[in-house]
Image (cartoon, rainbow, N blue to C red):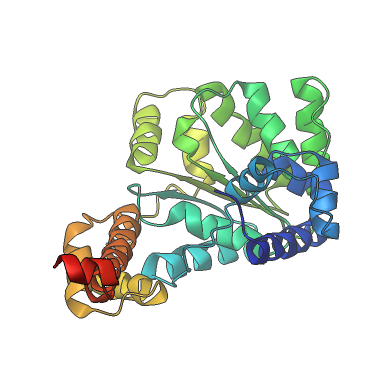
């Protein structure tokens, strides 16, 4: 599927906005394309940009043409926590089931405020890949040894005004990587906020490490205030907001979507999309039924 012209304009404007807010290098890294490609998109020089490249930029930057944002209860909670952590240089830990809207809210927050670094951790990362992702996320060069990159990242963050570092899926990091949080905290704690976020396994892992006196775990637990913050259950009001924002007004359909979601907003989206597909299918059937028959079909009948 190729992007139609008005979608390219929307994407170009968002890319230009992000580049102005941070840097073109940072946007290029997050988009997974070259700096030259981002420059062409910003200048609306699109002839040489393939459909695959457009799709890559859209996907990696999480620009969604088919889904509208809704301010659910957990969005408001997370947004408030991030803002408090940034304004007061606090470190907090959020541990909650998948599907409660964490990543979507972090993406929204990172785009809305200056000096916010947001990454999603991967199981397969080495220590160097972890720091490379952090340093590339702020638009700096990833060349150098692990120690050089760590020093480069810390020096950069010290020069920012009240930055916030959001490390999502923190539970996926290995011990050697989670230990870096203490180094970052010790160097930046008076000028930088931290949000460590993950599923329920994050809290369980840290507390188990504390109870077993594993190196580094008590330090992490202390630095996040010896507390893990949970989120609210998904309510019918939340689902109604999401459905209404995305074109579903039918109360019966909304209650079905809520009862079927099992506290997972990904399932809410899936059912909203299925609802629209069914509506479209029904309209196609109606059109087929009322379509006038040709003269040949009438004679045959």
Q: Residue 256: x, y in percent?
A: 17, 66
Q: Quadrant of residue 77?
A: bottom left
Residue 243 in sight here: yes
* Quadrant the C terminus occupies: bottom left
Residue 156 in sight here: no
Side (left or right) of 139 relative to 200:
right
Using the image as rendered, state which of residue 297 and residue 1 is in the foreground: 297
Residue 174 sits above or below residue 43 on the image: above
Using the image as rendered, state which of residue 156 and residue 1 is in the foreground: 1
Q: Residue 234: x, y in percent?
A: 28, 64
What residue lies at 34% left-to-right and 30% top-to-bottom? 208
Q: Residue 86: x, y in percent?
A: 64, 61
What residue lies at 47% left-to-right and 68% top-to-bottom? 68
Side (left or right) of 182 relative to 96:
right
What residue lies at 39% left-to-right and 31% top-to-bottom? 210
Using the image as rendered, state which of residue 209 and residue 203 is in the foreground: 203
């Amino acid at each position: 599927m190729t992007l139609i012209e008005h979608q390219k304009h929307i994407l170009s404007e968002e890319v230009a906005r992000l580049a102005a807010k941070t840097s073109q290098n940072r946007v290029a890294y997050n988009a997974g394309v070259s700096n030259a490609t981002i420059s062409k998109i910003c200048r609306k020089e699109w002839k040489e940009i393939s459909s695959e490249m457009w799709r890559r930029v859209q996907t990696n930057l999480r620009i969604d043409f088919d889904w509208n944002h809704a301010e659910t209860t957990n969005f408001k909670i997370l947004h408030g926590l991030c803002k408090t952590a940034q304004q007061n240089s606090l470190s907090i830990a959020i541990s909650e089931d998948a599907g409660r809207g964490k990543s979507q809210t972090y993406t929204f927050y990172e785009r809305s405020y200056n000096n916010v670094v947001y990454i999603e951790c991967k199981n397969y990362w080495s220590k160097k890949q972890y720091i490379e992702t952090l340093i590339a996320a702020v638009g700096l060069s990833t060349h150098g040894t692990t120690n050089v990159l760590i020093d480069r990242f810390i020096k950069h963050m010290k020069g920012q005004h009240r930055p916030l570092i959001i490390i999502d899926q923190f539970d996926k990091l290995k011990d050697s990587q989670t230990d870096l949080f203490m180094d970052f905290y010790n160097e930046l704690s008076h000028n930088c906020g931290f949000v460590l976020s993950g599923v329920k396994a994050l809290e369980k892992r840290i507390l188990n490490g504390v109870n077993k006196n594993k190196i580094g775990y008590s330090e992490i637990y202390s630095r996040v205030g010896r507390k893990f913050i949970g989120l609210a259950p998904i309510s019918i009001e939340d689902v109604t907001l999401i459905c209404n924002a995305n074109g579903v007004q039918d109360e019966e359909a909304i209650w079905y979507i809520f009862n079927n979601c099992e506290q997972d907003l990904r399932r809410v989206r899936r059912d909203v999309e299925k609802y629209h597909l069914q509506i479209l299918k029904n309209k196609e059937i109606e059109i087929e039924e009322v379509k006038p028959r040709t003269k040949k079909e009438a004679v045959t009948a």
